[in-house]
Amino acid sequence: MSFNKSKKLLITIVLVILISGYISAQDSQTLYYMNRVPQTTMMNPAMQPSYNVFIGFPGISSIEVDAGNNRFTLTDIIMKHPTNDSLITFLHPDADYNTSDFLSKLGENNFFYEDFRSDLISFGFRVNTWYFSFNLSEKFSTSINYPKDLMVLALEGNQSFINKSADLSYLGVNSTFYREYGLGISKEINPNLSVGIRAKVLFGHANASSDFKDNNISMYSSRDSIYLNADAVINTSSPLIATTNEDGEFNGFEIPSYIENAETDSLTDLALAHNNMGLGIDFGIYYKPIEKLSLSLSVIDLGYIKWDAEDVTSLELKGSYAFKGVDVSDEIGNSESDTDPFEEMLDSLENSFTISNTSKSYTTTLGTKIYIGANYAISKNFDVGFLSRSYYYNSNLNQTFTFSANVRPVNGLSASLSYSIMNGSYNNIGFGFVLGGAPLQLYVISDNVSAALWGHKTTSFNFRFGINIAIGSMQKLKSRDTPLLKSVF
C-alpha cells in the first residue's frame, strides 16, 4: 500500500503535522509519597522498598496513562445554553463565554499532551545497605504545541495583524515511542542519608519532531495582501519507507509489506529491534536534617535518543507566498469556464514552497524533570508532604506543586490524599490506595480523581495502577521514621 501524495496535499500534511505533539512522560505526583509501592524508586532512585525482594507482575506491574493541556477545561469550549436545555460552544452567539474570553486564557506557547507507560519487567532486591532494581518499560509520549497567534488568526482573522507579523514559530511536534532498560542502585550512607542512581539504555521505535528554536513560520498582513513565510524542518523516524519523485523531492510514505501483510515473524523482529540507541540517567538523594523531617531531591530522565540515519526522513518546508485575493470576475455568469481560481491559487501556493527530504541522524532529549520533596512525620503511621516538579516542556517551563497526607493504619493497607496545582488548574484532588503486601500487592493512584466528579472543570487526567509480588522477610521498624525512604508493606 502506498501513500504517494501530490505536493499540494503534502504541504497541507506537513503543516498539520507541524501543529500536531516533546518527549516528557509524566509520573504521578501522588505516587512519590506512597512509600509502600516499589515504583516510587522511578521518581527518586535513592528510595528503598521495605521488602528484601519485589517482582513486578509481568506486563501490569505499572501501567500509567496521562492526558491534558496547560490552558483549557471542557467548560471553556462546551457549555450549557443560557436559556435552552442544550449544549453550545463558546462560538455560539448566545454563549456568555465569548471568543475574547477564550483567547485571554492562552499564553504565547500552549500545548496538549498524552503519555503512556507500561513496565513489562521489573524487580528489585536488597544486599545489606544496598538496593538494586531493574525495569524494562515501553513508553509513548506526544504533545501538540501551538502559539496564541494561530488561534487569534483562526477565530478573529488577520485584523489584529495589519502591518505586523503573526508569529507561528511555536508550531511543532515531538512524539516518541521507545523502550527503556533501567538499572538502579541505592546506597544508605548512614541512617540520615541515602543516595541513588539509575542508568538507562534506550531504543527508539518511532519519532516525529521539529526543532522549536530553528523553526520560522510567520504571516504578515497589509491592507491588501497576506504574506506567508516558512522555514521549518520536521524529522521523522519510523518503519515507513520514504519515497521521492524524479527530482529527488519527497513524494510520500510507503508501508512495508511485512506490516501491510502482518507477517508475524517480521513484526516480532520489529518489536524487539534495538535501533536508535540512547542513554539516560536518574539520580536522587534523601536527607533527614532533624527528627521527623525528611528532604529529598531527584533529577529524572536526563538523557537523549539518537535516531539512526537509515530510518530517518527529514522534511524541509521553505518558501514564501503572497496572497492578493482571488479574481472571480471571469467566473460570474460563465458556467462553462475551464479555469478554477481557487485551484490556481493552490497551484501558486504549491509552487511557492519547496519540500525536500534528506536522511541524516538527529537527536531528541528526554525532557528532564526535577523533583524537590519535603515530608514531616506526625506519627509512625501518618505523615504530610510537599512535592515540587519542574520541567522544560516544548520551550516552556512548567511547574507542578502537590501537597499530600499519607496514612498507613495497618500492614497491608495504606492510602494517600493529595492536592495539586498543575497545568493552570487549581482543583486537582488526588487519591492513592495500596492493598496487600506479601505475597501480592495491588495499587491504584490518580493525581486528579476529582476529574470523575467535575471532569468538565479539569485540565488533565492521570491514572496509574499495578500489581507487585513481595518476597522475603519484613525488616524490623527502626526507631527513626523515614517516610521518604523506607516503610513496611
Image (tube, rainbow, N blue to C red):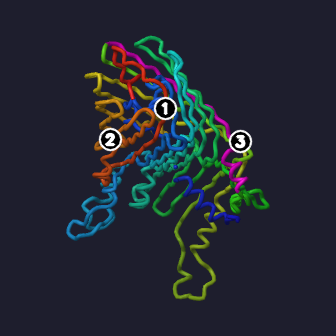
Q: Give the mark nearest the N terminus, 3 or 1.
A: 1
Disc 2 is placed on an element classified as strand
User: Residue 185 vs residue 260: left or right?
Assistant: left
> Magenta span has 239?
no
Cα distance between the residues tagged 3 and 1: 28 Å
Three-letter amino acid code of the residue under disc 3: Asp
For disc 2, the marked residue is 430
Region rendered in magenta: 264-290
User: Residue 316 vs residue 171: left or right?
Assistant: right
Instruction: Say which of 3 and 336 sits in front.
Output: 3
Cβ atoms at labels 2 and 1 below 8 Å apart: no
Q: Position of residue 475 (x, y in %)?
A: 42, 20
Q: Give the mark nearest the N terminus, 3 or 2.
A: 3
Q: Nearer the viewer, mark 3 or mark 2?
A: 2
Disc number for residue 42: 1
Are there few (<14), some (14-19), or many (20+) residues within 10 Å of tag 1? many
Instruction: Say which of 66 and 98 sits in front.
Output: 66
Instruction: Say which of 310 and 150 sits in front.
Output: 310
For disc 3, the marked residue is 308
Disc 1 is placed on an element classified as helix
Q: Position of residue 104 (x, y in %)?
A: 33, 50
Using the image, determine if residue 134 lies above or below residue 215.
above
Q: Position of residue 156 (x, y in %)?
A: 39, 60
Using the image, determine if residue 83 lies above or below residue 356.
below
Disc 3 is placed on an element classified as loop
